[in-house]
Amino acid sequence: MESTYQSLVQRILSKWEEKKVSSFNAPDTHPRLIIALAGPPGSGKTTIAQRVVSTINDYPGPHPKSVVMSADGFHLPLATLRALPNAAEAIARRGAPWTFDGQAVVEIVRELLVSAGQRPVLAPTFDHKVKDPVVGGFTVDADVEVCIVEGNYLHVDEEPWGQIAPLVDDRWLVRVETALARTRVAKRHVAAGIESTMEKALHRAETNDMVNGEFVAERSEGRYDLLIDSVEDMQSAWHVVCVGEGESTPSGTYARGPRCGPPEPTSGDGFEELGMISRSQIIDRHNSHSKITPISLQHTVYSNTSHSLIPIYISTHITMSTNGTTNGTRKSIRAPNPPVQDSIFKQFRLDGRTVIITGGAGGIGHEIAKGLAEAGANIAIWYHTSSKAANSLTETLIKDFGVKSKSYQVDVRNYAAVEAAVAEAVKDFGRLDVMIANAGVPSNAGGLDDKVEDWDHVRAVDFDGAYYCMRAAGLVFREQKSGVGIITASMSGHAANVPQEQSCYNACKAGTIHLAKSLAVEWAKWGGRINSVSPGYIDTAISGDCPFEMKEEWFSLTPLRRDADPRELKGIYLYLASDASSYTTGADFIIDGGYTAR
């Protein structure tokens, strides 16, 4: 991910998560985040919007489908301008606010708001070859979840543009120095064939685009949530900083005086500099080999929410060249942070997510299902023989927590059956977010006394079954670039606990712990996470038939002197399934009352 846009992306992802949570109690609604990005001609708003959306859509984790819709398509057609009483002025001033169909822009933003999840929205585009709008040239699909609408006048206080503000979720304004904007616009006019020479293009920019830009700046004052200062980059003229007064620069211009920082915010606007997007460099003219020295030219990002400041942190890209040798662009390998909720309660919510739990009909799995359903998750219960218990549990989850739930009979020893059941669950629930491989059986004898067929059975369920579940779910997760795996291992994977002899069980549980660690490294490349939980002695049906004397020895070796109620495990599984554990992968969590701490 290009780090210079990381902060803007994180802002969108955070707001998207907030929007989903706020709309959870309205099941018939389909939330869509709408951002209005405005700025004068030449401010670079189109580039910002396109890069942000591209970054979100390539995000290696859960992300909303995002698009950019330009207001350029709402130019009045040439035929309409020619029919105006002031036709000559209208054509010369094309791009002024009154040469747009502002009311149509308002209506399409309103349609974007109400059509989410219901129907596509057709928007006009602008064909620069014929210099006219194209009706229906762009489609915002019904499943689009984030739409950045970009245009010059989206924040101005003049009607009908002023009607847009209450319809959008976030308002971004790009600010730019006039000289820089003029140069950018003039180059664009030449490239588009609007003017034949740079001289004519500069004149057009000065007499039309800069006039429009001044209008945007004046009439958008204070009507934004985020302010972005657009300054020089390598694609346009050199912008010089940290140069003494009167020193010549490579472009032949002169610095006005020493300047080693970002542009100052407009006086009296109540903003402070909060972060920088470095996009440029300076040539040291005193070095005959054209050594390029890195500097901090930047887009400076400000934030305004009721005049309180929100920090926006954006890391830096620096391009360097020494002695005529290009070293390329130094890019950090740092991955982007996921959106993080401020509320700890929201971090643990699983609203709308789908969880598969194997061995879910009883014991630990039963309590995991109830805990995750209480947090809002839809639950797919996998069982092998306990159909009555599984069906009863799904009914309870639906009744008590208002979630979706369904039971499936699956033999986790059979990969084809596991793969088919995963596909069926995805079809039934529409998605898969978490796979919990919880099914397990104990050994009944030690390594020498165990029958080979019994050894194979325990291994097939406890180890192979865990792998099969993670493989089948992992293929789904990799395709969607997100997903969480949790394997129920055991403290027996860490210690040969006594007095029972269970070599196969111990070995399989140790194997699943390392399986989770290994898969965690593999999955991290595309945004997946996987961890394991190692319970100690738990009061379930599996241990219910154990002799009194055996249990007494367990308790004597456990510092807390007891076994656990399976409900005491709900918290760790909820943590690992939720966004609260977004930086947790490849870990094993021992929940054993201190047994292995001795």
Image (cartoon, rainbow, N blue to C red):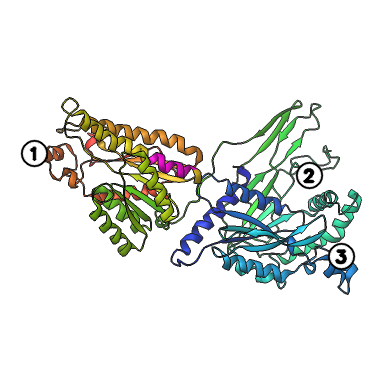
Give percent across and percent down for residue 24. Answer: 45, 63
Q: Is residue 332 left or right of residue 283?
A: left
**Callout 2 secondary element:** loop
Within-10-Å neighbours for mark 3: few <14, some 14–19, many 20+? some
**Quadrant into which the C terminus falls:** top left
Distance from label 3 to label 1 (Cα)? 96 Å
Give percent across and percent down for residue 222. Answer: 66, 64
Please state the extent of the stretch shown in magenta in the rendering.
Answer: 469-478
Within-10-Å neighbours for mark 1: few <14, some 14–19, many 20+? few
Q: Amino acid at mark 2?
A: Ser
Q: Amino acid at mark 1?
A: Glu
Q: Amino acid at mark 3?
A: Ile
Within-10-Å neighbours for mark 2: few <14, some 14–19, many 20+? few
Disc 2 marks which residue?
A: 236
Residue 475 shown in magenta: yes
Give percent across and percent down for residue 53. Answer: 62, 51
Of tags 3 and 2, the one toward the viewer is 3
Disc 3 marks which residue?
A: 91
**Callout 3 secondary element:** helix
**Quadrant into which the N terminus falls:** top right
Front-most of residues 43 and 60: 60
Disc 1 marks which residue?
A: 549
Give percent across and percent down for residue 346. Answer: 42, 57
